Image (tube, rainbow, N blue to C red):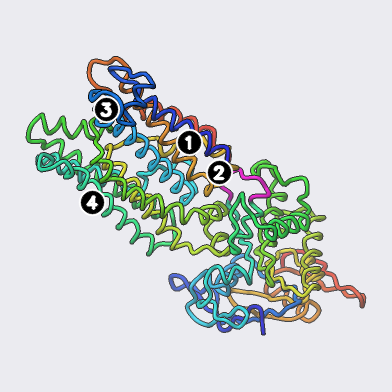
């Protein structure tokens, strides 16, 4: 059974098609990168697939159950979702923000169960936020805050994590650290779907790549299968070479096409 | 029970006792206790049971309802400057009360005025709740509330403009200034059930306010039923605020200021904020009402006026010190 499976998803607003006929499936142990230029419909696709946005067409199921028939809590126990927009209203301490990730298990701030506290501690360590636990969130840098939100999503310890641009604000070290963390999670049998703009990271860490262009999924396969010079030009409008020395594949981008 | 709640609760009880003891004729503590336990003179019992205690309790309950409603709405709307009347409930309740005064219906019975105010509050709450079912945006809700408030204020201005005689105009103005003067246990018993239901609904839905701190989208992803949460806060705050307006008229700023003052002591958690905000709101109004009674002024000071005089500068201070955009 697939952790998340979407078929024929479609959505348009005021006659403008944002997503059309999109299908994909995520199994356990997969690190899937969702790539595509700005405005290609990546975020809309995620929200449709998770049932956070009402679709015009198609179907989507989590663990074989249609998303419409899952309650918000049931869905949250299966999939953790990290949106791209991460507003923060109050200068709460880091530990409390991460603890909110346990909401679907009935956790309330100030009285977490043993199990909840342990999951929160694991998420804090995984995102290397040790020592930041009592810092007010508004005193952190953009990248540090980004890791706090990621830790919040990880604290739910769901079989599937769906993250919208989790590494955009991170420095190179933490970008790699985060992708390695995702890779480790998938090796342990969990699954990650992440929107990512750094094609090198996608090429290097993803086991599967979903290419989106103008609302459609135009390619779906391993990085080795799908990264071609023609596709990079068609989808992203860039001149790039895909170089392979047998063991490793890397990208050399020379500029806009 | 945590330390903040303990301190606030003790202070509130202390303030209530002080409120019963102080007044035109100060009563020493032993006479207050004697009257409360029906063991002192008839005169003392009359002053305590008929005049001071209902008045002090009214101030406390009104402050508590406004404090908790303010805290819940600030959490729902993610805005530290949201106030209990932001969704138009207070203004509509006040409008209905003004109608009653305009047509001189208040003389028909002691409960006509609060009944009208509660009816106004319920209608406004219903309208905003219906809007919440149809829209995804909290900004839309705020705008509807602002529209509702403005419209109610406009009709109130019209009624004052056309007031049949200076006495009914004075009645309207006096009522709108906000006071707990002359409140009886009957008034309290009328308003309390609405407040109790509102408070219960808010407390039952408070955990959802915590996750809303990370935005609607993340909260939904974390398992919050956004529509239910919004309805619960709108209905809970609508009932509690409506009952407060019915009991004391329009009293501003307590609902903004109380949550703000306790927030740092509760790790800025919108859920844990509710009870302390209610206690502090009650404390502020009980103390303000003591001030109203003991300050030597020629005509009676109104509680709403004193609350605004104290609250408005704090409001400016809060707005100027905001840490997050």
Residue lying at 38% horizontally and 60% vertically, measured from the top left: B132
Q: Are marks 3 and 2 on the same chain?
A: yes
Give me the C-alpha separation between circle 1 and circle 4.
Answer: 31 Å
Closer to the N terminus: mark 1 or mark 4?
Answer: 1
Is residue B319 at all visible to an observer of this figure? no
Mark 2 touches mark 4? (CB < 8 Å): no
Q: Work out whether disc 1 and disc 4 sit on a shared chain.
A: yes
B51 in magenta: no
Reading the image, the residue beneath label 1 is B9
The local secondary structure at tag 4 comes to: helix
Mark in the foreground, 2 or 4: 2
Labelled pair 2, 1 in contact (Cβ < 8 Å): yes
Classify residue A117 by image quadrant.
bottom right
The chain under label 3 reads B
Packing grade of label 4 (10 A; few <14, some 14-19, many >=20) is some
- Label 1 crowd bin: few (<14), some (14–19), many (20+), radius 10 Å: some
Q: Position of residue B116 (x, y in %)?
A: 20, 47
Residue extending furthest toward the left: B164
Which residue is under mark 3?
B45
Q: Quadrant of residue A189?
A: bottom right
At a point 71% along the width and 64% down the height, the residue shown is A197
């Amino acid at each position: 059974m697939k952790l998340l499976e979407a078929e024929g998803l479609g959505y348009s607003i005021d006659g403008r098609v944002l997503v059309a006929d999109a299908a994909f499936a995520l199994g356990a142990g997969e690190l899937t990168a969702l790539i595509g230029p700005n405005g290609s419909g990546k975020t809309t696709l995620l929200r449709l697939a998770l049932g956070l946005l009402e679709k015009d067409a198609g179907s989507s199921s989590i663990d074989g159950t249609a998303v419409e028939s899952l309650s918000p809590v049931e869905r949250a126990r299966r999939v953790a979702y990290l949106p791209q927009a991460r507003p923060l209203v109050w200068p709460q301490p880091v530990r409390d923000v991460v603890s909110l990730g346990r909401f679907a298990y009935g956790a309330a701030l100030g009285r977490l169960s043993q199990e909840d506290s342990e999951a929160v501690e694991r998420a804090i360590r995984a995102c290397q936020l040790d020592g930041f636990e009592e810092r007010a969130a508004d005193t952190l840098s953009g990248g540090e805050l980004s890791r706090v939100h990621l830790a919040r999503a990880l604290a739910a310890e769901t079989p599937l994590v769906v993250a919208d641009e989790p590494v955009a604000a991170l420095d190179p070290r933490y970008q790699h650290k985060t992708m390695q963390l995702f890779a480790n999670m998938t090796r342990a049998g969990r699954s990650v779907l992440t929107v990512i703009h750094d094609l090198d990271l996608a090429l290097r860490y993803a086991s599967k790549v979903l290419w989106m262009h103008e609302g459609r999924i135009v390619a779906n396969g391993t990085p080795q299968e799908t990264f071609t010079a023609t596709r990079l030009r068609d989808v992203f409008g860039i001149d790039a070479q895909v170089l392979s020395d047998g063991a490793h594949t890397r990208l050399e981008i020379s500029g806009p096409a | 029970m945590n330390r903040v709640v303990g301190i606030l609760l003790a202070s509130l009880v202390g303030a209530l006792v002080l409120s019963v003891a102080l007044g035109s004729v100060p009563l020493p503590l032993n006479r207050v206790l004697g009257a409360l336990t029906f063991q002192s003179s008839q005169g003392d019992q009359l002053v305590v049971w008929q005049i001071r205690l209902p008045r002090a309790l009214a101030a406390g309950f009104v402050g508590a309802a406004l404090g908790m409603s303010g805290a819940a709405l600030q959490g729902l709307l993610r805005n530290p400057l949201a106030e209990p009347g932001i969704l138009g409930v207070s203004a509509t309740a006040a409008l209905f009360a003004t109608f009653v005064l305009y047509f001189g219906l208040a003389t028909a019975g002691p409960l006509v005025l609060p009944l009208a105010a509660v009816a106004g509050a319920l209608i406004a709450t219903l309208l905003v709740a219906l809007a919440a079912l149809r829209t995804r945006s909290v900004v839309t809700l705020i705008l509807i509330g602002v529209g509702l408030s403005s419209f109610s204020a406009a009709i109130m201005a019209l009624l004052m403009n056309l007031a049949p005689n200076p006495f009914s105009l004075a009645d309207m103005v006096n009522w709108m200034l906000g006071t707990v003067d002359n409140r009886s246990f009957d008034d309290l018993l009328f308003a309390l059930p609405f407040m109790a239901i509102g408070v219960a609904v808010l407390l039952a839905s408070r955990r959802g306010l915590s996750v809303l701190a990370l935005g609607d989208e993340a909260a939904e992803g974390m398992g919050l039923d956004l529509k239910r949460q919004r309805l619960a806060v709108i209905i809970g705050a609508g009932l509690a605020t409506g009952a407060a307006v019915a009991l004391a008229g329009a009293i501003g700023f307590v609902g903004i200021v109380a949550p703000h003052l306790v927030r740092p002591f509760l790790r800025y958690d919108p859920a844990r904020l509710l009870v302390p905000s209610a206690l502090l709101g009650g404390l502020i109004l009980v103390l303000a009402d003591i001030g109203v009674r003991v300050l030597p002024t020629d005509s009676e000071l109104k509680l709403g006026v004193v609350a605004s005089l104290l609250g408005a500068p704090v409001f400016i201070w809060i707005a100027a010190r905001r840490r997050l955009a």
